[in-house]
Image (spheres, helix red, strand yellow):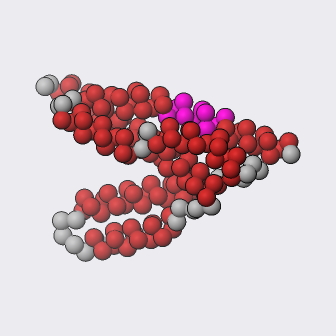
Amino acid sequence: MDSGDYFITWIVVILAAVSRIFQNFFFDYYRNEYLSYVYNKVANLEDEIREFKDESKRLESLKGKKFEKFLIDIYIKYSKLQRKSNNHKAFSVSPEEYKKANKFILRLWSWLGSTTHLTLIIIFSIVQHIEIYLIATIVIGNFFMLVFLAYQSYLNNRFITLSGSK
């Protein structure tokens, strides 16, 4: 492999990683919105962030734990971004109506979640073609994410319109 191939490989890896971040972010966001509106369950990010901050501080005093601390710090930033974006719209439809309208799209969102991706990573690692997984994450995963975002926006705007007409 020449240096150009390594460069292209790293670009694909970075694009796939960024794609996964966005796919996870939107899946988590709309899953939490669904849980919050339908079941009145609010993700307690404050407690989780506090626990991970404590763990990060604990790791600072231990040798050889810089990578673990780095990962925890990234997760803390991700959680803070989730918390900041959790200003859900107030819909004036009942939780039952919201559930009925969003149950299918939430199932679709789950296909972009971690379980699907871990399964695909395992499969493509076994057949020694991880590049197919990376390219599929970028092309297919992002395509579905954009379609799901458009449909979710349509549903949410429909509920806002309904609330304005009542």
Of 103 and 28, nearer the camera is 103
- Give residue 130's quadrant in the image: top left
Q: Is residue 137 visible?
A: yes
Question: Residue drawn at (37%, 33%), measured in percent from left and top?
Answer: 137
**Extreme right residue here?**
166
Q: Residue 89, percent across and down?
A: 69, 50
Above or below, 16 against 85 in this view is: above
Q: Residue 4, percent across and down?
A: 21, 24
Q: Is residue 86 visible?
A: no
Question: Residue drawn at (40%, 27%), measured in percent from left and top?
Answer: 139
As for residue 85 lying within the magenta part, the answer is no
Question: Residue drawn at (42%, 32%), measured in percent from left and top?
Answer: 141
- Give residue 134's quadrant in the image: top left
Quadrant in which the C terminus appears: top right
Q: Residue 13, percent across and down?
A: 29, 35
129 to the left or right of 137: left
Residue range in magenta is: 145-154
Above or below, 51 against 74 in this view is: below
Q: Residue 66, percent across and down?
A: 24, 62
